[in-house]
Amino acid sequence: MKTVLITSKEFGSQIDIEHRRNLEQYFFENGWQIMWNATEAAMTAGDIIQLNARQLLDAILVYSSSDEISREVFKHCRNLKVVSRHGVGIENIDVSAAQQAGVQIKTTDKMPGYETVADLTFALMLSLARKVPQIDSNLRKNGWYRPISSDVWGKTLGIFGLGRIGKAVARRAKGFDMRILVNTRHPDEAFVTAHGLSLCTKEELLAESDFVSLHCALTAETKHMIGAPEFGLMKPSAYLINTARAGLVCQRELLAALKSKKIAGAAVDVFEQEPAVNDPIITEDLDNVVATAHVGSYTVESLRRMDFLVVQNIVAAG
């Protein structure tokens, strides 16, 4: 049988036992045995190489953007045929080294999970503006807390990146009668025209938006695209929402902007290191932050589809 390493023991377990058994059975029926990451932590290249020394790996199912699928992995794991990513972000995978080694890289980019992420983006936007987490927390402590909050309806939304998620967010924003500004390298002119969006420069978007939402891929060009200079351009009343990748934002400078009230607040679903239990964005306990644990695609419907697709990608390639 061929061997697949699954980099997190959480895989398939979030819905129910039967779902995970079905995934395991699908692997078994197609000639695959599973090797699990036994720890709670993301896997380093050294962890993967060590497991490969014990049992040659034919495939890796990458569950987290914190798993390290580096050039060293492809150098030592010579039996690898495919790396299948649970999700669409491949910034933690050395794609060039994979190509040189003849290893296929697969993602779940063909599934409609972008609608699920767009839902969370809007949930975070509303939570920030209406201070939902703070009100809920105070009420649970028997505190009658009634802060003055901000509207979302009719405000200006700035979207960086107009891929499938960016478009899904724009469609939702139209329902809130929002003015929508877009900065993207690859504008879909037909979509922009049909939905009444306005293409603009990065500086214009930051200066005019009440909400700034990130939906870009993390690349060498987009790394830390939002930092102190960008926070300086934003309105003091503006909010940042990041459901894309933590590396798009300089985290140290985001924390400084939040503490100094340079911006009104931020909602983050992604962190530099996950699990993010000790991330300063969380541990500082700021009242202008809403944080979620990388749950953009975590709905029953989305996870069920994604779990099977990431497994099918391995079976089809192997």
Image: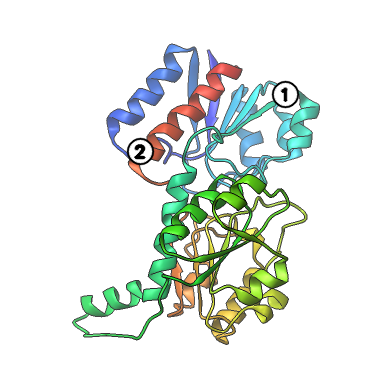
Q: Position of residue 55 (x, y in %)?
A: 59, 23
Task: Provide the residue designation for mark 1.
Answer: 78
* Res. 188 visible in picture: no
**Residue sitting at 48 percent across and 40 percent down?**
8
User: Where is residue 78, by image quadrant?
Assistant: top right
Q: Is residue 65 above or below residue 183?
A: above
Please name whichever residue, 141 or 306, is drawn nearer the observer in this view of the structure.
306
Q: Nearer the viewer, residue 141 or 243?
A: 243
Instruction: Give the secondary structure at mark 1.
Output: loop
Secondary structure under tag 2 reads: helix
Residue neighbourhood size for the residue with mark 2, other residues' Cα within 10 Å, grouped as few (<14), some (14–19), many (≥20)? few
The residues bearing labels 1 and 2 have C-alpha atoms spaced at a distance of 36 Å
Q: Disc 1 residue type?
A: Arg
Q: State which quarter of the image contains the C terminus.
A: top right
Q: Residue at x 49, y 34 (%)?
A: 111
Q: Which residue is mark 2?
A: 301
Q: In the image, what residue type sits under mark 2? A: Glu
Give the colour scheme of this rendering.
rainbow
CB within 8 Å, label 1 to label 2: no
Residue 101 position in % (x across, y down): 77, 26
